[in-house]
Amino acid sequence: MNTLKTILSGLCLLCSLQLSAQEKPAPAELPYSNKIEVSDQALESLFQAPENISVELAPGFHIKGKIENKSDHGNSVISLLIKLNNAEGSMLSIARYRDPKGGIYYTGRLLKLHDPDGMMLIEKDKRYFFIETQQRFLVSE
């Protein structure tokens, strides 16, 4: 009886080792899987545009829409809410901050209705990237 248990235990161990050794694809749920670099000049053009916007932020990443809301928060912060016409149900919320030393920084989120993914604008080493990520990471509950 012990021999049968040993054989079955050995087979189970071999099967589990074989399954764990198989190559697994990278998870598609990584929050920073795709990124698009955008220049600060392209981002600034959003704040200089009239009510209707048509801007190529990066090659293959075109923003076309209408400014729904523009808010000045003192002298240092301006925020825009842009309804995108080229991506149905999408809204771009972007803000420009000016620090006391005169440096300008941007932050933003692109939310897509009926889509699990959105985009977040981040700054890394004075370069800006739109990072594709799940909307659950972008919207607080």
Image (spheres, helix red, strand yellow):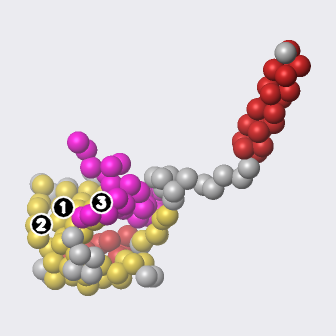
In the rendered view, would you say 9 is above or below 83? above
Among all residues in the image, which is located at the extreme front?
1
Q: Secondary structure at mark 1?
A: strand
Residue where numbered disc 3 is placed: 109
- Residues drawn in magenta: 113-141
Q: Is residue 104 visible?
A: no
Report the mark closest to the observer, 1 or 3. 3
Q: Disc 3 vs disc 2: Cβ atoms closer than 8 Å?
A: no
Q: Disc 1 vs disc 2: Cβ atoms closer than 8 Å?
A: yes
Q: CA distance from mark 1 to mark 2?
A: 6 Å
The location of residue 72, given as percent across then percent down, is: 11, 60
Q: Quadrant of the N terminus?
A: top right
Question: Residue placed at 20% from the left, 56% from the top?
Answer: 76
Instruction: Please name the amino acid that badge 2 sits on.
Output: Lys
Question: Residue placed at 48% from the left, 65% from the top?
Answer: 35
**Residue 131 within the magenta-colored segment of the rendering:** yes
- Corner quadrant of residue 96: bottom left
In the rendered view, would you say 132 is above or below 58? above
Q: Find residue 120 and name its label.
A: none
Question: Residue placed at 42% from the left, 71% from the top?
Answer: 38
Front residue of this view, candidates 111 and 16: 16
- How many other residues sit within 10 Å of disc 1, few (<14), some (14-19) or many (≥20)? some
- Corner quadrant of residue 50: bottom left
Mark 1 or mark 2, earlier in chain: 2
Residue where numbered disc 1 is placed: 79
